[in-house]
Amino acid sequence: MLSTECRVACRRLLHLGPLCALLIVLAGCGGGAPAAGSAPAPSLAPTAGAAPGRSAFRAEELAGRLLFVRGGVIWQWRGREATALLGDGAAFQPAWSPDGGRIAYVTRGNDYSDVLLADASGAPLSQLTFNGSRQPINSIERVYESTWAFYPAWAPDGARLAVAAQPSPPGGDPPAEYNLGLYELPVGDGAQASLYASDSAQCGRSVYTPAGDALIFVRSGGGAQGQQELYRLDLAGDRATPLAGAPTPSYDPAISPDGRWLAFAAGDGARTEIFALPLAGGGAPLRLSDMGAARAPAFSPDGSQLAFLAIAPGEGGFDLWVADLRVDEGGALRAGAPRRLTTGLGLDADSGISWAA
C-alpha cells in the first residue's frame, strides 16, 4: 500500500497535465470534481521569472492579439511587441472568447486546478470552478477533496466552455483519481454538465466546430501503449467517433476562422509536426511544418497565417514561430517557410496559443 507521502507526490505530478494523469491512473494513484476552498485568482501583475531581453523577440508585426505562456505567466503579442499580461506563475492554457473581450484560463494550485475568466487587459472577472480544498497543504485529506480542470475551449456563442475535468474527488485507499472527461461549463449561472467520459480513456484539449454542434477533442486510450487520438463528439447525438483521416498519435486541434480546415499536431515517426485536414472530411493529412518538434497550432484571425510552438534543431525548449498560409490550385492548404518570433524562452507547449482579432 502506498504511503501518504507517495499519494501526495503522485497527486502533484498531475500539475503537468492530463498525460501525467493517465500515467498516475496506470500506476494505481488515479481523479475528482468540484470542492470548496480554492485559492483566489492569480494577481494581476505578472511576477514569475526574470523578464526576457529584447533579443528574445523578433520585431515582426502580427495582426490581432496572440496569447502564449512562459513560466506560468500569460503573455500577449500585439503589433510588434510581446508583454506579460497576467499570472504569478500559476496561469496556463489561455483561450480568447469569440468576441475577443475575455480570456478563460487555468490556475494550478497544490492538488487542484481551476478555470477563471479575465478581461482583455488581464484584469480578473470571475472564477468558474472551485476545485481546491481548505485542508492543510500536503495532507492526504486535501487529496480527497481536490479535483482538476484543464483546457477551456469557448463555444461559438461565448456563453459556455468545454473543459477536461473530473466528476468527483478521488476515492478508495490509496486514493484513485477519476479519468478526465469532457464537461460543459456555463460562463454565467448553472452547473457543470457531462459531455463525454470513459473508464478506459482520458480526455484532453477540445475545440468546438463553428456551428457549435460538435467538439473535436483529444482522447488518450488506457494501457501502457495508450496514444492520443482526435475524436469527434456529436453534441446532439452524444456519439464520439475517431476523426477520419487523423493519424495516431494526434492532438492540439485548431479550426481555421472560415471553418474549412482542422490543424493539429501529429507524430511522424520520431518527429512531431503540424498537419491539416479538411474539417468536412476527406483527403490525406497535409503537412504544414518540417521542424522535427512542432505542436500547438493557432490560425490568425483572418486565416492567412499559422502560429505554432517548436523546438529549433539543437535546442531544448519551445519557441514561437509563424508561417504564411495559402491554398494551392488543387485546393490544398500550404504553409510557407516558418519565421522564428522568439528565442530561448522555453514556452509552455501544453498551454498552446490563442489568437484573436
Image (cartoon, rainbow, N blue to C red):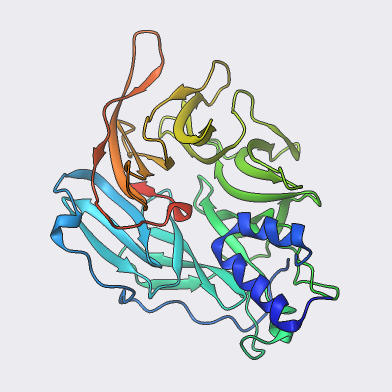
Q: Residue furthest top?
A: 330
Residue in the image at 39% along x and 41% along y = 298
Q: Is residue 314 above or below residue 133?
A: above
Name the side, left or right, on which 307 lies relative to 138. Answer: left
- Quick check: can you spot residue 118? yes
Residue in the image at 79% along x and 49% along y = 200
Q: Is residue 107 above or below residue 136?
A: above
Residue in the image at 73% along x and 86% along y = 141
Frontmost residue, 309 versus 293: 293
Residue 126: percent from left, percent from top = 48, 72
Frontmost residue, 286 versus 50: 50
Q: Residue furthest bottom?
A: 136
Residue 219: percent from left, percent from top = 67, 44
Q: How many marks?
A: 0
Residue in the image at 71% along x and 77% along y = 6
Q: Is residue 51 above or below residue 37?
A: above
- Quick check: can you spot residue 357? no
Name the side, left or right, on which 134 lies relative to 288. Answer: right
Q: Is residue 37 above or below residue 337?
A: below
Frontmost residue, 256 versus 12: 12
Q: Please identify the quadrant where the N terminus is shown.
A: bottom right
Residue 52: percent from left, percent from top = 22, 64
Frontmost residue, 51 versus 95: 51
Residue 36: percent from left, percent from top = 66, 81
The image quarter containing residue 146 is bottom right
